[in-house]
Image (cartoon, rainbow, N blue to C red):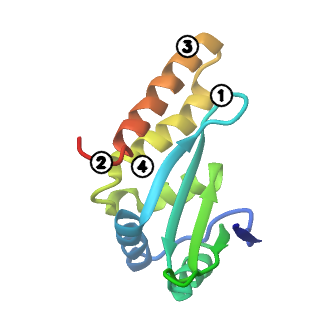
C-alpha cells in the first residue's frame, strides 16, 4: 500500500550548477525517466527517485520546489522507502535543467523531451501516433531490465 503526500508548485525552482550536477548524479544512480501510457495513448513523462533516506527526498523537494512523495511502509526485512515523483511539464522543466549533467540517462532524457515536443509538433494525428509510439518503444527498450 502506498501513501502519497502531494507537494507541488507551478514551476520548478532554477537550480544552481552544483544542484543540477548533484540531481543529475542522483537521477543517474537512483532514479528513473519513463514514458507512461494513459487511456488516450499519449505517453506522459515521469521522473522518479527512490531512497530509504528521507533527507534525500526532502532535499529534492526543497531544491526543485516540485514533486510528489510516495511512501512505502517498511517491513521486517525492508526499510521504509520514499519516492519523489515529478510528471509531465514539471518533469520536462527539471530534465531540461539537468540534461547536460546526466551521464547514464541522457538518452532517456532526450527521448522524454522529444515525446513532450511531439505533442506540439504534429497536427496530423496519424503522424503523431506513429512518432509517439516509436519514441515510447525506444524508451521502453532503454529501460528494459535484465541482460541486453
Q: Which of 116 and 136 is in front in this view?
A: 136
- Indicate the secondary structure of the residue bearing disc 2: loop
Residue 85 shows in the view = yes
The number of discs equals: 4
- Frontmost of labels 1 and 2 is 2
- Frontmost of labels 2 and 4 is 2
* Place of residue 118 in the rendered image (x, y in percent of width and height, measured from the top left): 55, 29
- Frontmost of labels 1 and 4 is 1
- Rendered residue at 48%/43% (across/down): 112
Specify few, some or many for label 4: CA neighbours under 10 Å numbering under 14, 14-19, or 20 or more: many
Q: In this view, does 148 lie to the left or right of 41?
A: left
**Residue identifier under label 4:** 109
Q: Which of 98 and 52 is in front in this view?
A: 52
Q: In which quarter of the image is the N terminus?
A: bottom right
Q: In this view, does 140 lie to the left or right of 104?
A: right
Contact? badges 2 and 3 (CB < 8 Å): no
* Place of residue 48 in the rendered image (x, y in percent of width and height, measured from the top left): 53, 62
* Place of residue 63 in the rendered image (x, y in percent of width and height, measured from the top left): 56, 79
**Residue identifier under label 1:** 41
The numbered mark, 2 or 4, whose residue comes first in the sequence reads 4
Residue 124 shows in the view = no
In the image, which disc is placed on residue 30? none
The numbered mark, 2 or 3, whose residue comes first in the sequence reads 3
In the image, which disc is placed on residue 146? 2
**Residue identifier under label 3:** 127
- Indicate the secondary structure of the residue bearing disc 3: helix
Contact? badges 1 and 2 (CB < 8 Å): no
Disc 1/disc 2 C-alpha distance (Å): 26 Å
Res 67 quadrant in image: bottom right
Amino acid at each position: 500500500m502506498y501513501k502519497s503526500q502531494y507537494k507541488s508548485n507551478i514551476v520548478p525552482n532554477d537550480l544552481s550548477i552544483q544542484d543540477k550536477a548533484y540531481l543529475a548524479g542522483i537521477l543517474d544512480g537512483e532514479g528513473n525517466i519513463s514514458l507512461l501510457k494513459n487511456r488516450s495513448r499519449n505517453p506522459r513523462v515521469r521522473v522518479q527517485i527512490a531512497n530509504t533516506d528521507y533527507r534525500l527526498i526532502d532535499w529534492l523537494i526543497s531544491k526543485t520546489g516540485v514533486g510528489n512523495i510516495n511512501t512505502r511502509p517498511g517491513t521486517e526485512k525492508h526499510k521504509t522507502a520514499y519516492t519523489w515523483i515529478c510528471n509531465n511539464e514539471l518533469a520536462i522543466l527539471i530534465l531540461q535543467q539537468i540534461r547536460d549533467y546526466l551521464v547514464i540517462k541522457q538518452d532517456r532524457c532526450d527521448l522524454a523531451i522529444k515525446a513532450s515536443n511531439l505533442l506540439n509538433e504534429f497536427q496530423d494525428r496519424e503522424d503523431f501516433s506513429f512518432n509517439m509510439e516509436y519514441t515510447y518503444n525506444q524508451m521502453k527498450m532503454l529501460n528494459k531490465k535484465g541482460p541486453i
